[in-house]
Image (tube, rainbow, N blue to C red):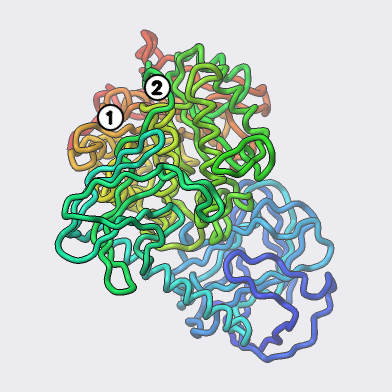
Amino acid sequence: MKPFFRFFCLAAIASAAFISCDPKPLDDDGGSDNPVKPTEELKYVELNLVSNGCHALELEDSGSGSYVLKCNGADPYVYSAKLSESLEENMQILEFEYKCAESIDEFQIFFAVKGSPTEANSNKYTNLQSNTADYVKFKCDMGKYRLNGFGKEGDRLRFDPGNSGSRTFYIRNIRIREMDANEKKIHDEVYSKEEKKIYMAEHLEKYLNTSYPSSVTNVTVTADKVKVEGSVSGSGDYLLADVTPWQDITELAKFPYTTKISGKNFSITLDRYVNGREGINYDRVFSKWAVVKVDGNSHILDSHARYADEVAAISSPAPLELKTKKGIGAGDHSYYFNDIRDMNAGSITMNVLLNNMVTGKGSDYQYGGVNYSIGSTRDYVDNITSSCKSMGTVISAIILCQTNSQYKDPENDGGYYTMPNITTAEAFNMYAAALEYMAKRYSSNDIGRISHWIMHNEVDSNSEWTNMGSQPMMRFLDRYVKSMRICYNIVRQYDQNAAVLGSYTHCWTAADGGFSSRKMLEKTVQYSKAEGDFWWGVAYHPYPQSLTRPEFWENDNSSTYSMDSPYVTFKNLEVLSKWAKTADNLYKGEKKRIVFLSENGTNSPSYEESDLVKQAAGAAWAWKKVSRLDGIDAVQWHNWADNKDEGGLRIGLRTFAEGSFKNLDPKPAWYVWKAGGTSEEDAVFNQYLPTIGIGSWDEIMHEF
């Protein structure tokens, strides 16, 4: 028998505002259980929830389309019944009513095509009302999920009411319905914007693949001047275009900032600083320069744009070398600093919330002619860098901007962190101000140094970790490369050995979180060749395919010894190492790019001995493999200590308090990590060979 699926007519609620991307819950009836009178009859499909497939949740059917969800563990979720027939094209609106007496950290909805949920076809809503005694209305436009294939027979929804914890969530009247006239108008406007994004992505792809007749061959930035050299292709009038970070080079019919080019080969010197450009004092160190040909009232792009090849140094600290490949993730505790010393860790990571570093306009710090306020993150960073400076520890700062902060990209529609807003001169200046403040402060050993700048988090999982709304990969990547370039052209002035690193999940050719990390890396290489190479590297997160299961040597069947492997995990790090050493991917064709494994660990599902042993075996495998792969420079184990707020994961080297375990007790994995690279390594590591089922660590290495 097919699941319940019927068409009904629904009364549209006139007062309900339409939310297109990240819907806010709407209290349409003032918190009452009495429905508002109908103004328009709309066709709808009623959805039932089913107990089959529930996880960490008990489902109670109260009848008449009402349900009680009793969450009792990590990652609770429940499915709807599968659609028994396909939805009509105009069926775009999902709505339901809910109430919950407890707090709700986030509510995730999966639009499961063919019944299979994926992160790419889901959205997280972090603004649902909590502590509600009356039902609240929720609705959203499913347009992008319909475009991704949702709505066919056999598809279903999955509701995840929070990450973990115990709560009771009431939900009723779950429906998918057709749009009313106002919603359709807004929907059409939204999806005309979606089409524009697709065109822009196509233009960027064409731009990278075009062999232009003219060229910019070198850009040198001194303390007060910019010299741009190049050649033009033929007769006619040519201009040198100064392209700012907030401009889209492929979308400009006329470039606003230009200088006339005379002669076939040119060398043009301009002032570095331009006062009063769109409200800021602009530093042309951030510009990229292109040749454009004049065609009547239009400008035709005639070269790739080129960023600065050389930038005058403000300070020149000596290189800070890695003393070992072993590192640990972010922490801020006396035990943490002791572990850095006792483990002889060569590197650490540190999360930096940029929105708490430069918090907005104020009177503490001036950049680009604008005054800004400095926030509390400075004290946190000062503590980390000053505590590590005497130990010679290489620090990587993970640059993050929280969603709904002052750095929010205008197209952001949710997620934990946002792509920084660089779409206007004002927004760009605040972002550059924060990075400049950090680079200037943390470029010497006075307070301690940051030598690696990891730009944002897991950008291939873009909707969750570096959100700028639903985007084609090329448009998202173009913005990301700009963000990396802005940081690089700041920090290189204070430390010529500093590097910026791109952050990626364990997806390689797979695109579970949105994009393929290999594809993004390939395109970043292409950008570097087109627009001038820069010293960027890779901050990879080779977690097991299932973050909850430590025995990746058995489970990671899609982590293969092939450059086309869907995933790169601890199991097959050879793939990433080989990519880094491939000639086509080298910096300027000569130097291997830095590769850090900046966030990774194996989980202990519990503190039972068998789970702790598996986690430790995974740590031993990880160290043995990293230590033998010359394409990988360092690994920072994450987390340093287990965190109860990490969705049920226990991937740290130390415990939280539970049962007989005290807070920050060392786990067996801690002893493995401490022994790595020391004379005790084999004695500690070899006890885990039987757990993995091998006789020698040589057996984990593969050549291909």
Residue lying at 51% horizontally and 51% vertically, measured from the top left:
419
Left or right? Give the position of 26 relative to 591.
right
Q: Position of residue 626 (x, y in %)?
A: 33, 27
The reply to whether callout 1 and callout 2 are in contact (CB within 8 Å) is: no
> Relative to the observer, which residue lies in front, 357 or 688?
357
- Residue 630, picture quadrant: top left
Identify the residue position indicated by label 1 in the image.
700
Q: CA distance from mark 1 to mark 2?
A: 42 Å
Q: Within 10 angstroms of label 1, few (less than 14), some, or many (20 or more) residues?
A: some
Query: What is the residue that sits farthest to the top in this orientation?
Result: 679
Task: Check the picture and name the quadrant holding the C terminus.
Answer: top left
Residue 669 in sight from this viewpoint: no
Q: Amino acid at mark 1?
A: Ile
Of marks 1 and 2, the one in the foreground = 2
Q: Position of residue 397 (x, y in %)?
A: 50, 32
* 223, above or below 279, in the image: above
Residue 225, label in figure: none
Residue lying at 24% horizontally and 61% vertically, measured from the top left:
302
Q: Within 10 angstroms of label 2, few (less than 14), some, or many (20 or more) residues?
A: some
- Residue 208, picture quadrant: bottom left
Callout 2: SS: loop
Q: Position of residue 634 (x, y in %)?
A: 37, 26
Left or right? Give the position of 50 relative to 248.
right
Q: Position of residue 58 (x, y in %)?
A: 67, 57
Q: Amino acid at mark 2?
A: Ser
Residue 289 in sight from this viewpoint: yes
Identify the residue position indicated by label 2 in the image.
316
> Relative to the observer, which residue lies in front, 153 or 216?
216
Among numbered discs 1 and 2, the one appearing first in the sequence: 2
* 638, above or below 342, in the image: below
